[in-house]
Amino acid sequence: MNQPTVTVSGGDLRGVLRNGVRVFKGITYADAERFTHSTLSDHRWSGVRDADTYGPQALQVPGTMELLLGESSQPTAEDCLTLNVFAPTSPGPHPVLVWIHGGAFTNGAGSVPWYDGTNIASLGSLVVVTINYRLGAFGFLGHSNLGLGDQLNALRWVRNEIAAFGGDPSQVTIMGESAGGCSVVALMATSDGRDLFHQAIALSPSLPQIRAVDRSDETVAETLRAAGLDDVDALRALPGDALLAAQAAMLDGTSDALTAFSPTAGGDLLPSDIHAAAARDARPLMIGTTRDEMHLFCAFDPAVTGMDDDAVQRRFSHLFDDTAQMLDVYRSHRNDHNSGQLFSAIRTDAVFRRPAHRLADDRWAHGHQSFMHWFTFPTPVFGGVLGSCHALDIPFALANLDRTGVELFTGTDERRADLAHTFAGAVSSFAHRGDPGWAKWDDRRVTQVLDLDSRCGVDVIEDPEPSIRELWADANAG
C-alpha cells in the first residue's frame, strides 16, 4: 500500500502513500497544439506507470504571488496539461474537490506547495484534484479561451476517471482563488460545464479580469507588436521562450495588464455576459474575499505609499462625484489607514468585494443559493502592513498551515489552527452537502466572518459595512 495503484482508461498508475492519503501526480489529461483547443488524452501504456512526480508547469515567468507562495520546483513546458489526485485510502465514494490555481492567468501551477491536497483530503474525506492549464499567450491569446477549455477537459477527465480513485463523479465541487476564482465563475457561465460539476467555491475571484472581444483583439495586436511580427501564424512558429519574452514585453507595455490575458466574454465557450449567466446558474456557490486584498500589491509600492488624500481622490474621480465623501466613508471604517492604504481599500472593493457581492445579489434575485464569507484575519508579518491581504486565506481554506513558508506569511499565532479548522471544515461541508454551515445570502446579506476566534454559523454579520455598499451603489460605474 506504500505504492498504491489504480487503473484508469490509459492503464495502471502507481502513486505514493503520504499521511494516509494516496497521491498520484503528473497525470496527463489532455493534449494540445499551440493556439488550438486541447482534446482529452487517449494515451495508452502497458505495465504500471509511475505517478510520483508532478508534471511540468505551463510556460511562465514567476510573478510576485508565485515567489511568495513558494513556487513549484517543476520545470516549465508547453506540454503541461497534467493533474494530480489526492485520495483517502477508504473506498468511498467521496465527494471530489477540483482546485483551479490563480496567478492572473499568467502564472501558477497545481503543484504549488500551498495547493497540496493531502491535508484537506484527509480531514474532509474528499478526493482532491489540482490541475495545470495553459497560461498567458499560450492559453488566452485572443478570444479562443484555450486555458478555460483546458479546465473543462480536466473536469471531463474527472467525470470519466475519478471513480477509480474512490471519487464520486456525481458530486464534484470546483474551487479556485483569484484568477482561479474568476475561472470558477466563468465555468459556471459556460454551457459546456453544465454537467461537469455540481457546486462551486470562488475565493477572491478577480472578476474584472473578464474582458470583451474588442479588448482581446487589442491584446493580440499588442503581443504582435511586442514580438515584432505581423500575424498569429508567425507567433505560432516562435520558440516557446521567444513567445514568452514577447508576452513579458507586452505586459510591461500595455495600459491594462489586468485584462492582457484572461477569459473573453463572447469568445469561444463563453456567453457575452458571464455575470448574468453565472447569476442564473442554479448550482450552489460559496464565495468571499479577504478584507484587505490589495494590500498585497500596494503595501510596498512607492506610488501608493506616497499618496496623499488629493491623489486618492483624483484616482477615483471617474467613479465618485463626491470623492471627499468617499474618503470620509472609507476612513470611518479604516481609521487606522493612511492615504495610500485607503487607496488600497477602495481598490479592494472595486476589484474583488463589490463584484462578488453584486453576483451574490443577482443570484439571490434569481432564487439561487450563495454563501458569502469575509476573511478578516490580519497577518502580523512585515509589521502588519499587509493586513488581511490577497492569498492569505489559501493555507487556511486548504488546511495547509504546515507547508513550507506559510508561517512567513501568516505568522505563528497558535490560534491559526482553529481558523484553518473552521475554514477547511466549511469547504468540506460545502463539498459534501452544498452548505458551508451558515445562512445563505439574501436581502439580509448574511456573511460569515473568518478570523482567529470565529465560529462557523455563529460569527456572522448582516450587511457588512452598509455605508460602503451604499457608496458603491451610487458610483458612476453602477
Image (cartoon, rainbow, N blue to C red):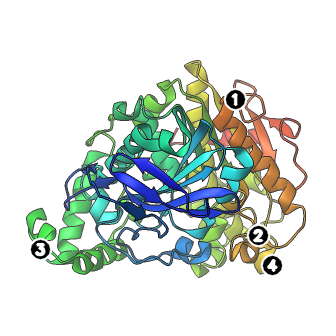
What residue did someone put label 3 on?
A: 229
The residue drawn where x is 74% and y is 54% is 330
Secondary structure beneath dot 3 equals loop
The residue drawn where x is 29% and y is 58% is 45
The residue drawn where x is 69% and y is 38% is 372
Q: Which of marks 2 and 4 is in front?
A: 2
What residue did someone put label 2 on?
A: 410
Secondary structure beneath dot 2 equals helix
Q: Disc 2 marks which amino acid?
A: Thr
- CA–CA distance in space, label 4 to label 1: 35 Å
- CA–CA distance in space, label 1 to label 2: 29 Å
Depth check: give the residue in front, 384 or 65: 65
Q: Earlier in the sequence, mark 4 or mark 3?
A: 3
Q: In this view, does 373 lie above or below 82?
A: above
Q: Residue 128: which disc?
A: none
Q: Disc 4 marks which amino acid?
A: Gly
Q: Earlier in the sequence, mark 1 or mark 2?
A: 2
What residue did someone put label 1 on?
A: 441
Secondary structure beneath dot 1 equals loop
Q: Which of marks 3 and 1 is nearer the N terminus?
A: 3
